[in-house]
Image: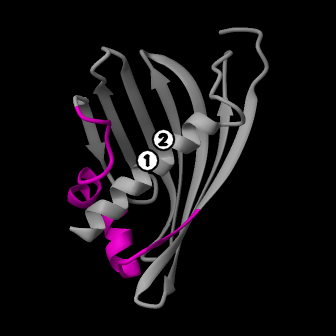
Amino acid sequence: MSNTPTVHASFTIDRTFDATPDRVFAAFATEQGKARWFGGPAGWTAIERVFDFRVGGRERAMGRWPSGMVTDFDATYFDIVPNRRIVYAYAMRMDEVRISVSLATIELFPEGAGTRMLLTEQGAFVDGYVDGTGGSTREHGTRYLMDRLAASLAE
């Protein structure tokens, strides 16, 4: 633990998918759907995976990157409205050091034959962890995951 102040950052991703709200929701809400897009890059190896999608449920994705670094996403779901909204909080660790705690809200809206998604994340970066400028590294990683989600929905 350091004496460094906590750094707060937030971002919103506004994205439209060529899939119905129930298909987009299922990509978050089912273990099979989420496994298709949520994980590390090529060479990332899963160490532990827990998936309990329900209010009060937990999700954990821990894995080793090709560099040897281990990341750990550990979430709890607080609000779920099928095909409409998901609210969860998660802690992120790198090599067993907690770097952030975030609140994420995913909202889904029918738009034509597709779905508009608003993803808003509010993060607290702790103990001197620097996440680019204003959470830019986290936002970049989340946008990368949304690209993977879009690709999985197109398959």
Q: Residue at x 74, y 36 (%)?
A: 8
State how far apart marks 1 and 2 are (Cα): 5 Å
Label number found at residue 141: 2
Give x and y (percent) for residue 6.
Answer: 75, 25
Q: Are marks 1 and 2 in contact (CB under 8 Å)?
A: yes
From what the image shows, is residue 138 above or below residue 84?
above
Outermost residue toward the top?
A: 2
Count of numbered circles on the image? 2
- Report the amino acid beneath label 1: Tyr
Comparing 52 with 14, the one in front is: 14
From what the image shows, is residue 34 above or below residue 50?
below
- Horizontally, is 107 left or right of 69 in the view? right
- Horizontally, is 56 left or right of 150 in the view? right
Give, as a single range, the part of the protein colored magenta: 14-42
Hey, which quadrant is residue 55 in on the image? bottom left
The residue wearing badge 1 is 144
Q: Residue at x 33, y 37 (%)?
A: 61
